Amino acid sequence: MNVLVVGRGGREHSIVSKLNESNKIDTLYIAPGNDGMSEQATCVDIDETDIEGLVQFAKEKNIGLTFVGPENPLLLGIADRFQENGLKIFAPRKEAAMLEGSKSFAKAFMKRHQIPTADYETFTDAEAAKAYIKEKGAPIVIKADGLAAGKGVVVAETLDEALQAIDAMMIDKTFAEAGTKIVVEEYLEGREFSYIAFVHENNVFPMIPARDHKRAFDNDEGPNTGGMGSFAPVPDISEETLAYATEAILQKTADGMVEEGRPFTGILYAGLMMTADGPKVIEFNTRFGDPETQVILPLLKNDLLQVLLDVLAGKDPQLAWEDQACVGVVLAANGYPGSYEKHLPLPTFEGSDVFTVYAGVTGGKGGLVSNGGRVLLVGSKQPTIEAATQKVYQSMETALTNNSGFFYRKDIAK
Ligand code: AMP
Ligand code: GLY
């Protein structure tokens, strides 16, 4: 079977690496991919958002299954268009991807189905939002309704910060149309984890939990980023909590979507806060997490293509996981998530104990240079989290000089 993956980052590099282990694939394509993954898949120069171009390509190359990495194509209706053309795709239709595409939709959905989440109100009027915030007090959380590339959330410690966030989103339009509507929500205290599942209609098959480190600098300081490192599984989250989250969050969500006539097929990602009252939803994504995928997939024992085909066929894929731990640390260009330099030469990470996942890179064989803020991830799979962490940092310390132009967090998984 020919298989097409859509996307270009580290998450997609992990997905093609895992799919590449399958002996059922004739040719594996990635659109557009990056030069760091060209040994695992054939890169095709079609943008993720060029839906008609992707449909055309899938027809021409007789693609048997398409898998989508990022959210943008989902909200542009890639699954709808592929299905209309009789093409098999593992991805939610646009109306189901609204769980990620609209925070107000997701919140109202959770309320309708009694899925545990923070209390909230939705606003389209800045003055009304401000009045509500003054009544509730800080800390409080303000979210732009639409997609804002992970940057549309302000966790305000003070009332002033909260009011400024309203001005930025609703009056200055920092996130353009994504900020026309906002969600103001109760601040939840606890530890976060990502709980991700393969879903097809009422069937839910959860993966092992992972934790992502979103702030740029050590000790969770600095601005929010796309993610600076991750590990899986998560020792402080109990089996009992996971069983509860599977039933009360993932399964209820899948069932609720079916009930509402917008059945979900694809990857359902619940960003959860482990509060004193149990796990509560912070956000839904309708795709794999980045960089969680980079530490979850290496622990999956199954053939990923077979898993996707089984799930689509309504069968239990019998997921099996290695009894090990995986840690990944992101190497970013100095200045990220603000402005940064590109075309920096890349270090190489020695040792059979570590693997490299490429995100923002370009260039030919042997001559890769950086081409983004988050450049690559160094990962390791070991019997324990401690051992994996040590291998990753050993390799990074050896490879990197002080003036490499890159930085990374020193406290991932610690
Ligand atoms: P989101 O884009 O919704 O994942 O939000 C980004 C980050 O903001 C999350 O990973 C949390 O760390 C934080 N956050 C979002 N919502 C809340 C909340 N209700 N309470 C506390 N922290 C939150
Ligand atoms: N790691 C968080 C995300 O993918 O949204």
Image (spheres, rainbow, N blue to C red):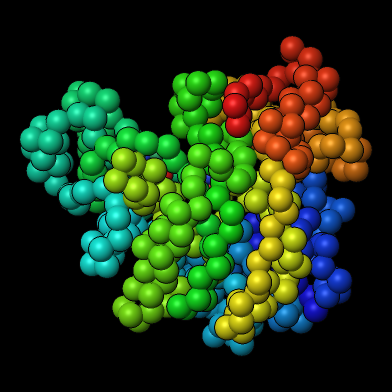
Q: Residue at x 62, y 44 (%)?
A: 232
Foreground residue, 4 or 241? 241
Ligand 1 quarter of the rendering:
top left
Q: Which residue is drawn at 80% across and 40% down?
A: 355
- State the residue lying farthest toward the right: 366
Percent x, y of residue 351: 89, 33
Q: In which quarter of the image is the N terminus?
A: bottom right
Where's the C terminus, which quadrant?
A: top right
- Spot the residue most to the top: 402
**Residue 179 is at least partly visible in this image:** no
Residue 371 lies left or right of residue 82; in this view the side is right
- Can you give x and y, in whole percent of width and height, for residue 263 in the image? 42, 77
Instruction: Give residue 321's quadrant in the image.
Output: bottom right
Task: Write the residue at 34% across / 73% down.
Answer: 256
In-front residue for pair 304/184: 304
- Could you tell me how many numbered marks the image carries? 0
- When the figure is inspected, residue 258 is found, relative to residue 206, above or below; the finding is below
Q: In this view, does 164 lie to the left or right of 236?
A: left
Q: Is residue 3 visible?
A: yes
Q: In this view, does 164 lie above or below 281?
A: above
Residue at (60%, 39%) from the top-left corner?
Answer: 230
Q: x, y (%) of residue 179?
A: 30, 46
Q: Where is residue 125 in the image (x, y as percent from the top left)?
A: 14, 46
Q: In this view, does 174 lie to the left or right of 271?
A: left
Asked if 308 appears above or below 162 in the picture, the reply is below
Left-right relation of 218 to 345: left
